[in-house]
Image (spheres, coloured by chain):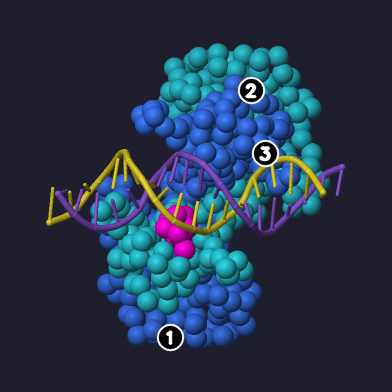
Chain colours: A cyan, B blue, C yellow, D purple
Amino acid sequence: MSDAGRVSYRDIGAELSRRIADRIWAPGALIPGEEALAQEFGCARATVNRALQQLARDGIVERKRKSGTRIAISPVREARLAIPLVRQEIEGKGGAYRYALLSRAVEPLPEGIAARMGLTAADPLLHVRALHWADGAPYQYEDRWIDLDTVPAAGEADFSAVSPNEWLVSSEPFSRAEYVFRAAAASEEETALLELSPGQPVFLAERLTWLLARPITFVRMAHPPSHRVVTRL
Amino acid sequence: MSDAGRVSYRDIGAELSRRIADRIWAPGALIPGEEALAQEFGCARATVNRALQQLARDGIVERKRKSGTRIAISPVREARLAIPLVRQEIEGKGGAYRYALLSRAVEPLPEGIAARMGLTAADPLLHVRALHWADGAPYQYEDRWIDLDTVPAAGEADFSAVSPNEWLVSSEPFSRAEYVFRAAAASEEETALLELSPGQPVFLAERLTWLLARPITFVRMAHPPSHRVVTRL
DNA sequence: GAGTGGTCTAGACCACTCA
DNA sequence: GAGTGGTCTAGACCACTCC
């Protein structure tokens, strides 16, 4: 037995990727079935299957039963975007993290945010505003609304030491979220808090989180224009 | 045999997720080994393994040989960001797509971009500028540099009918790409082309693509502030 | 050394989809 | 109906890591 020569799903994935890159199989082309590839590589079909499933997850190929596996025409590749806590994000870059609570009050929900959360405007929600610094410079202004019906325990938390970001993650770990990234002109408040010059834009990341069908929190995170969101594929 | 009652890796993933959500296993906790879970669920270890690998990919658990599997303390969940072609992006939303080439010339590479591409400033590269519309409104201004040493065929393409975006995707495989999202004040050119009011910001997506160690292309895509990048997790 | 996850195999049956 | 991928099994051995 050639134990050392055992074929791995990585080997197969690499070889298939090479063939695609080298245009041996052009975009749109149908490639051999799993059985045939297993024979060619001298391995079990399950091993080929695993390699192909990975390529399919990465958007390199498209698979359909009965039809077979094709090279994706336009590689709608998916980027993976890690979304850490602000503190981890800053400390991960070697920066010094500082946090301060700006305000905390139960207030009526503004209409625009109510619509996005699927709630009624003027419903009372917990409104928390906070600022995060990296190395002494303003890094993120956090403007958050929390539904106390869904997360009653948030009513007891005072957020002066632990940011609502971290508090929520550690108390409600498992939920569905939607992120929106966009650019906007900085409001007066944002200009002041982030120490911007007038007219500078902000980078906005807005996150909406649900626990099952109930909204937990909506947060708007404003960053100075030096902010970068980086991803690789 | 209860064929209908066969246990799927999805069932196991769902049940484990439920236990995590219900805090039966708190963040940081060590969960039973694969062997034990396989016995509990009455299935093969491979099935449990597949479920756990998926949870690990999603950042829900962390696995280490010998140590076992733990619930992730802070779910640094990864968002998946689909990166389609501009045309697909627009048509996928039901919009009418239009494209026009603005300019195409071999020019010396500006210093800032040369540094990011790992090239020497003043190297001659193909500079292509183009505009993409959705439903008659400017959607994206594309400002692209292409390394003709790596992609000589681009010298023959005229890009008047097919955007460089689509041409490159369908003719040149790439091995690695890096995206940067950020906000910036619109330049005069961007203000004019995207039909913005003075002082409005733009949303920038910059993409750098390599074939092995060689840079293929750098592109800066500027969108009006109405643009949204949306992702779920 | 020993425990736990990582991977491969050979075979089987199922599920979807095309013709 | 038939072809192709999707999944599960039972068993085996390997690889990493903690002690």
Query: As shown in the figure, which amino acid type bears the numbered disc 3?
Result: Thr
Q: Are discs 1 and 3 located on one and the same chain?
A: yes
Q: Earlier in the sequence, mark 2 or mark 1?
A: 2
Magenta span includes A48:
yes
Secondary structure that dominates the magenta span:
helix
Q: Residues within 10 Å of mark 3 (few under 14, many from 20)?
A: many
Q: Earlier in the sequence, mark 3 or mark 2?
A: 2
- Residue A202 in the image, given as x and y percentages of width and height: 59, 46
Is B194 placed left or right of B206 in the picture? left
Q: Earlier in the sequence, mark 1 or mark 3?
A: 3
Closer-to-camera residue (C5/B76): C5
Q: In the rendered view, tell whether residue A42 sits above or below residue B96.
A: below
Q: Please report contact status of discs 2 and 1: CB closer than 8 Å, yes or no.
A: no
Distance Cα–Cα, label 3 vs label 2: 16 Å
Circle count: 3
Q: In the rendered view, tell whether residue A117 sits above or below residue B229.
A: above
Q: Are discs 3 and 2 located on one and the same chain?
A: yes
Query: As shown in the figure, which amino acid type bears the numbered disc 2?
Result: Arg
Residue at image mark 2: B23
Asked whether residue A222 is in view, the answer is: no
Q: Which residues are magenta?
A: A43-52
Closer-to-camera residue (A110/B216): B216
Residue at image mark 1: B152
Residue at image mark 3: B69
The chain identifier of the residue carrying mark 1 reads B
